[in-house]
């Protein structure tokens, strides 16, 4: 069913392979709990949606599955998936109360009867198991992806399926532009000094190791390398603001100037970033995972 959709693709947040991000989602008025930021993300996150459907387009649902969307954010992707469930259900969960409230308001039961959203602090808050778990552009921002993968394994039925999309960087010019901009604005870098311990979910080798440690059987593990297009620098700017302000701890009132500077410096480092028509060609790879719970 999904494979017939025309949506082609291309989520979200960026990270350097092997370095531990300094991201924080604590605080009811900080990070992804800022109301203004949630709205900005909703209106300027088409790229994340395209990336999700890039993977979803390969999947055929029967329509009676019980599905969990881990890190459902603003809920738009979760709501779209629910339209393919004639008898099943999908639950979107997130730790951001503002994201959950926004999703509930945008996609009420009257419109999406097979859909629900919930704020959780831990996967142990969930009392049921699922046939399928989706997680789009989430695991690269959690402090312990192995623990999350292990917990997700425990929430699947036997032979249940896990599908992941994980951004993985591979754009050194972008990260150089970002580091220089952090220094210019006097903000703490989004990456801690030093190297993270253990395998990185942002590499193929690290993803394989972590999935196997969590007792998943890997069905497909691949790197997708494409350019992601934005119609102009204004669209690119709004995407950066909505996607990275919270993850990089950039105060939202400063985000416009901060990311404008990032784009300016990136264009100097990468002469192919903006073509003659003004279209932005942004390079960001991602990893696709399809895995099965095995005993």
Image (cartoon, rainbow, N blue to C red):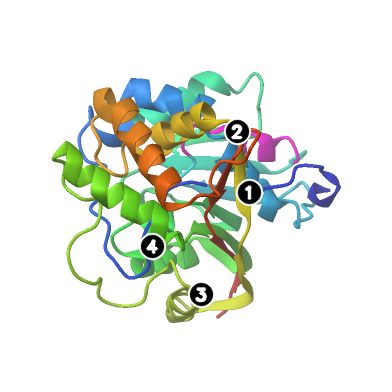
**What is the distance, in whole Å, between disc 4 and disc 2 at their CAs?**
41 Å
Badges 4 and 1: C-beta atoms under 8 Å apart? no
Residue 168 against residue 257 in the figure, above or below: below
Query: Residue sitting at 75 percent across and 42 percent down?
Result: 7
Determine whether, in the image, residue 17 is placed left or right of residue 6: left
Residue 291 sits in which quadrant?
bottom right
99 in the magenta segment: no
Q: Nearer the viewer, mark 3 or mark 4?
A: 3
Q: Residues within 10 Å of mark 4 (few under 14, many from 20)?
A: some
Determine whether, in the image, residue 192 is placed left or right of residue 122: left
Residue numbers of the magenta segment: 73-84
Q: Give the label on residue 148, or none.
A: 4
**What is the distance, in whole Å, between disc 3 and disc 4 at their CAs?**
18 Å
Determine whether, in the image, residue 111 is placed left or right of residue 188: right
Q: Which residue is mark 2?
A: 278
Q: Which residue is mark 1?
A: 10
Pointer 3 or 4: first along the chain? 4
Residue 78 in view (yes/no): no
**What is the distance, in whole Å, between disc 4 and disc 1 at their CAs?**
24 Å
Q: Residues within 10 Å of mark 3 (few under 14, many from 20)?
A: some
Instruction: Give SS at disc 4.
Output: helix
């Amino acid at each position: 069913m999904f494979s017939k959709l025309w949506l082609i693709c291309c989520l979200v947040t960026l990270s350097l392979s092997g370095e531990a991000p300094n991201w924080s989602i604590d605080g009811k008025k900080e990070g992804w709990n800022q109301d203004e930021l949630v709205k900005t993300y909703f209106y300027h996150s088409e790229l994340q949606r395209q990336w999700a459907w890039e993977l979803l387009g390969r999947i055929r649902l029967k329509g009676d599955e019980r599905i969990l969307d881990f890190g459902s954010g603003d809920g738009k992707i979760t709501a779209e998936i629910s339209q393919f469930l004639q008898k099943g259900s999908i639950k979107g969960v997130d730790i951001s109360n503002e994201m959950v409230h926004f999703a509930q308001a945008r996609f009420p039961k009257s419109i999406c009867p097979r859909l629900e959203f919930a704020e959780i602090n831990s996967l142990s808050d969930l009392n049921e198991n699922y046939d399928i778990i989706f997680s789009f552009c989430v695991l690269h921002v959690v402090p312990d992806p192995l623990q999350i993968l292990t917990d997700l394994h425990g929430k699947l039925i036997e032979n249940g399926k896990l599908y992941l999309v994980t951004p993985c960087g591979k754009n050194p010019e972008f990260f150089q532009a970002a580091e220089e901009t952090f220094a210019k604005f006097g903000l703490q870098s989004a990456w801690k000094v030093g190297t993270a311990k253990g395998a990185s979910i942002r590499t193929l080798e690290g993803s394989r190791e972590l999935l196997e440690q969590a007792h998943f059987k890997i069905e497909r593990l691949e790197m997708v390398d494409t350019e992601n297009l934005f119609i102009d620098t204004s669209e690119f700017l709004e995407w950066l603001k909505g996607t990275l302000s919270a993850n990089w701890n950039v105060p939202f009132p400063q985000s416009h100037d901060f990311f404008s500077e990032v784009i300016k410096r990136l264009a100097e480092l990468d002469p192919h970033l903006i073509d003659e028509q003004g279209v932005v060609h942004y390079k960001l790879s991602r990893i696709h995972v399809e895995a099965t719970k095995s005993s």
